[in-house]
Amino acid sequence: MNTASNAAVLVLEDGRVFHGTSYGAEGETFGEMVFNTGMTGYQETLTDPSYHRQIVAMTAPHIGNTGVNDEDPESKRVWVAGYVVREPSRVVSNWRANRSLDDYLKEQGVVGIAIPGTRALTRHLRERGAMRAGIFSAPEAPVEELVERVRRSPLMEGADLAREVATGEAYVVPAIGAKRFTVAAVDLGIKGMTPHRMAERGCEVHVLPADATYEQIMAVEPDGVFFSNGPGDPATADVSALRRVLEARVPFFGICFGNQLFGRALGLSTYKLRYGHRGVNQPVQDVRTGKVEISAHNHGFAVEAPLDGPFETPYGPAEVSHVNLNDRCVEGLRLLDGRAFSVQYHPEAAAGPHDAAYLFDEFCEVMTRAKA
C-alpha cells in the first residue's frame, strides 16, 4: 500500500489515471508518454538525447537489477522527462554497478513512478496513441486540475528540439588506430557510441552543432557526412545544408532523425506514428537482399515514401531500402548511385542487437569509392 508520503500518480491527457509509488526524484514532470519494449539497456535509454521531453514507460517488469555504472551512459546526463516502471529492483546485482538506479534518478532530478499497471498503460497507448502525460508525487490538487495541466503542456508535433540537446561547440573523436577517413557528424542528439563505432573503423569524427552550415561542414574537409539521431518533429528542421551536401555529391549516411531529414531533403514528407517504435526488437527487412535484421529503435516520426520501386529526387533516382515488418513503415532510403543512404534505426547497438553494424562498414565503402 502507498503511504501519503510516497504516493504518486501518472495522469494522461485523455483523463486516464494510474496510481503508484514515487520512484527516483519527487516532484512533477510533463512530457509525451511513450513505452520502450527493451528488456535490457535502461541506462542507455535514459541517457539517449532522442528521449528529450518524453516520459518513458518500460514494459519489462523488473527494472534496475544491474544498477548504474559510469561506462554505459550515451551522453553526459539523463534526458527522459520522466520514468515509469512496474517493479523497481530492491537489490543491485552487477559487479560493474556503483549505485542504484533509484539513486541515479534522484541525482539527475528525474521524477518517476512505479505502477502495477504498465501492461495496461502500454495497451492504452497502443490503442489510443502516444499522448501528453504528467507524473505528480504526493499531489494535493484534484485529478481534474492535473489533467488540465497536462493538456496545457507542449505537444511533440511542431517541437524543434535537436538544438536543445546537441553540442554547442564542435569536438573531435579521433580514429582508433590508423586514420582512414574524416567524417563530419552533425549532432542532432548523437549517442556517444555512434562516433565510437566510426572511430573503430578508422574515422576521425568531427562532431558539429545541429545548426552547422554547409560551409562549416565542408571546412573539416570530410570524406563523408553523417547526420545523427535526435528528438522532435523533423518537419521543423532546416535541411538546406544537407541539400547542398547532396548537390556536392559528398558521401552521406544518416540514422533515425538523420533518416527523416534525408527524406525531407529528397522532397519527401514526414508524419507522426501512432505510438512509435522504441526498443531493441524491431524486425526490419533489407528489400535489396531480403535479409531481416532485429534492430534498435527510438522514433515517433517516419518518412512517407513509395514502397513499390524507385522514385525521382533532385539528386537522381532513389528507393526505399528497408521496411519494418510489423507495420511496413519506411526504415531506410538510398540514392541509386550509391553515394547517400540512411536508416531509421540505431546501428550503434547501445543498447541493442548488432545485426545492423555492417552499415558503418557500408559507409566506409562509400567513402572509399568516392576517394578512388
Image: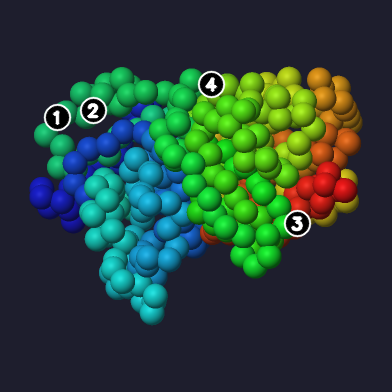
Q: For the residue marked with disc 1, what is the amino acid? A: Ala
Comes first in the chain, label 4 or label 3: 4
| Residue occupied by mark 1 | 141
Q: Nearer the viewer, mark 3 or mark 1?
A: 3
Label 1 Cα crowd, 10 Å radius (few <14 / some 14-19 / many 20+): few
Q: Secondary structure at mark 3?
A: helix
Q: Which mark is residue 361?
A: 3
For the residues labelled 3 and 1, the Cα–Cα distance comes to 55 Å
- Measured as percent of width and height from the top left, residue 333 is found at 76, 36
Q: For the residue marked with disc 3, what is the amino acid? A: Asp
> Which residue does the image show at 71% across and 30% down from the upper left?
245
Comes first in the chain, label 3 or label 1: 1
Q: Are marks 4 and 1 in contact (CB under 8 Å)?
A: no
Comes first in the chain, label 1 or label 2: 1
Q: For the residue marked with disc 4, what is the amino acid? A: Thr
Residue 163 versus residue 193 in the image, above or below: above
From the viewer's perspective, tell me whether residue 115 is left or right of residue 369: left
Q: Nearer the viewer, mark 4 or mark 3?
A: 3
Instruction: Work out whether residue 354 or residue 139 is closer to the camera in this orientation and state it.
Output: 354
| Residue occupied by mark 4 | 236
> Which residue does the image show at 24% across and 60% down from the upper left?
103
For the residues labelled 4 and 1, the Cα–Cα distance comes to 35 Å
Instruction: Work out whether residue 164 or residue 290 is closer to the camera in this orientation and state it.
Output: 164
Label 3 Cα crowd, 10 Å radius (few <14 / some 14-19 / many 20+): some
- Measured as percent of width and height from the top left, residue 223 is found at 73, 44
